[in-house]
Amino acid sequence: MDEVDVLVIGSGPAGSITSRYAAMKGVSVMFLERRSEVGVPVRCGEFMPSDEEIVDMFPKLKDEASLFDIPDELRCIDINGIDLINPAGKTTKLEFSGYTTDRDRFDQYLAKLAQEEGAVLSKSHVFQGIEDGIARTSKGDIRYKVIVGADGPGSKVAQNLGLAKNRNPYPAVTAQVKGDFGDSMKMFFGGIAPGAYGWIIPKDGRANIGVGMSPKFSNGSLRSYFEKFTERNGLIPETKIMGKYVPSEGPIAKTVSGNGMVVGDAAGQVISVNGGGIPLAMIAGRICGNVAADNVLNGTSLQTYEAEWRDVMEAPLKTAAFNKKLADTFAFRSDFTTKMCMGILGKRRMANLIRCKRIFP
Ligand SMILES: Cc1cc2nc3c(=O)[nH]c(=O)nc-3n(C[C@H](O)[C@H](O)[C@H](O)COP(=O)(O)OP(=O)(O)OC[C@H]3O[C@@H](n4cnc5c(N)ncnc54)[C@H](O)[C@@H]3O)c2cc1C
């Protein structure tokens, strides 16, 4: 039977960063990925906020520069704003900085950093469950001291640890189109179906396009809404349409149980109002990896992870979840209410909304 100090399930940003920081402290780390290639297929809008925007949202974050030190070749173009477009086509322009990436190459880079620190990546390897404190996997049993679930929104590790599921995750699909789309992201609210929104996120001579929807308000097929969105905006997808679920209600109640932790989407560490989760998975992953290693080396309680990530991220994430609830209650029911609420909010409050800040008073 394989034995390892820290077993991490998943090689997305949460899993790779957790593995990297745990391995940096000298413990043995293995991270499993059920897919045959890290990051493939891409199921993401591929936007990363700038360090300045991340710190503005999470002011307690320290040493962001080393965590988000992403090489230039992984940055497609700089993004300088967001255009929020209401159901009648009226645009509100907001400043917001960041860059777009190719998410497959991005995830592969993070996994490589973890491997360079000594973490062992095992691909096409599926975690199946925990029995008697041992991980059952498609390639045999693995004994571990600490297990980390970085296995995405429907986390099997969370379930096996007796932790809560993400409630009401919403489905979203994405594809790539060719063309020049400037340097502002476009977010379209309403116009497709109640509770559905679309995006065009510019890349170099291409763009990532997509549609997400709240099943609470729309019961049609997401693919048909995507087709409506592409037709309306004259977009011709060049790639297969890929989809996934996005946690929408903020972090789950507890992220530690026994000798296990969950991180990233598995923990609901996603900004409810815009579905952004890459930087959060990385912030929490660094804390998780450090605490996992400290637990193995000197018995540090895993509750330290719970306390530390909540200190940095919980308040802004709860504000975002509250704002999302307000939007669901008052705005997303129909095009009419969406348009009216966007008008009432105006530019300043919408800028607060996308930055996890309070919109009232
Ligand atoms: C359509 C869409 C668009 C998005 N756009 C953006 C965006 O533009 N910017 C942004 O910041 N965020 C975006 N997000 C959110 C972002 O993609 C996630 O928050 C982020 O990927 C979370 O990282 P993670 O490592 O927690 O999970 P994931 O990236 O989901 O990684 C989990 C990994 O675990 C693996 N896995 C799962 N189960 C098992 C198992 N049993 N055994 C082994 N391996 C397993 C999976 O194959 C996967 O590789 C978007 C999400 C969606 C769905």
Image: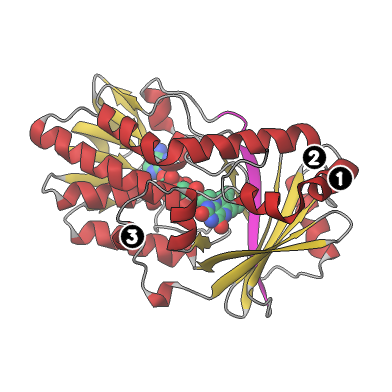
| Place of residue 68 in the rendered image (x, y in percent of width and height, measured from the top left) | 36, 61
Number of other residues with Cα within 10 Å of mark 1, as a class: few under 14, some 14 to 19, many 20 or more: some
Give the residue pinned by disc 3. Answer: 110
The one of 315 and 186 positioned closer to us in this rendering:
315
Q: Where does the image place residue 312, in percent across and percent down from the top left?
A: 38, 41
> Is the N terminus in the top left, top right, bottom left or bottom right quadrant?
top left
Which label's residue is closer to the chain start, 3 or 2? 3
User: Can you say whether 3 is above or below 275 in the image?
Assistant: above
Q: Circle 2 — which element? A: helix
Question: What secondary structure do most residues of the magenta stretch adopt?
Answer: strand
Residue 331 got which mark? Answer: 2
| Residue 338 percent coordinates (x, y) | 83, 45
Look at mark 1 in the image and give the residue it sits on: 340
Q: Which of 258 and 239 is in front in this view?
A: 258
Q: What stretch is highlighted in magenta?
A: 167-178
Count the numbered circles shown.
3
What residue appears at the point 20 percent right and 27 percent down from the top-left corner? 301
- Counting other residues with Cα less than 10 Å from the Cα at mark 3, is it few (<14), some (14-19), or many (20 or more)? many
Q: Which amino acid does label 1 sit on?
A: Met
**Who's the residue at 59% across and 35% down the image?**
321
Write the residue at 44% across / 58% down: 39
**Residue contact at pointers 3 and 1, CB within 8 angstroms:** no
Any part of residue 355 in sight: yes
- Residue type (three-letter) at the residue carrying disc 3: Leu
Q: Residue at the front extreme?
A: 361
Mark 3 or 1: in front is 1
Q: What element carries label 1?
A: helix
